[in-house]
Image: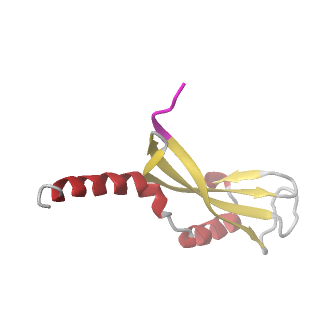
Amino acid sequence: MINLFGKKSSELKQEIHKEIICPNCLSKNTTKISVLGVYKHLFHIPFVSGGKYGASVCTNCNHTFELHAMPMTIKLAYFELKETAKTPIWFYIGLIGVKVLVLVKIFSRYF
């Protein structure tokens, strides 16, 4: 079945934090924190950003923490990383394309 519209996600930024100790296996320098961006698409062309969310995974024991279940130390590092992660312009490329086509149609009457 062909998806005409929906949501997709893309990894915006990731970092392996040096000071965080995994609460599951108690190993240091193994927690990878990721910030993921969600966009809504039409015919696989991104139109609008759907926000950011994150997750962390220990590379030693492969234990995953979602945002609501993260320990406070990992959650603080996630929010610091989220502040520096920017939403890319290509999340809005479909919306920009539609606006350009409308402007071309409007100005084609005068030239």
| Magenta run includes residue 20 | no
Residue at 68 percent of width and 57 percent of height: 70
Work out which residue is located at the far front of the displayed protein and give it: 111
Q: Is residue 36 left or right of residue 32?
A: left
Q: Is residue 13 left or right of residue 105?
A: right
Q: Main secondary structure of the magenta part?
A: loop
| Colour mapping | secondary structure
Q: Could you say where residue 36 lies in the image, as x and y percent from the top left? A: 59, 56
Residue at 81 percent of width and 60 percent of height: 23
Q: Could you say where residue 63 lies in the image, as x and y percent from the top left? A: 80, 51
Report how many numbered discs are placed on residues in the image: 0
In depth, the one of 18 and 99 nearer the eye is 99
In depth, the one of 32 and 91 nearer the eye is 91
In depth, the one of 9 and 72 nearer the eye is 9
Q: Is residue 61 left or right of residue 47?
A: right
Q: Which portion, as a residue range, is magenta?
A: 1-6
Q: Is residue 103 left or right of residue 48?
A: left
Quarter of the rendering containing residue 103 = bottom left
Residue at 79 percent of width and 74 percent of height: 18
Quadrant location of the N terminus in the rendered image:
top right
Q: Could you say where residue 17 lies in the image, as x and y percent from the top left? A: 75, 71
Q: Could you say where residue 78 lies in the image, as x and y percent from the top left? A: 63, 66
Q: Is residue 29 above or below residue 64?
A: below
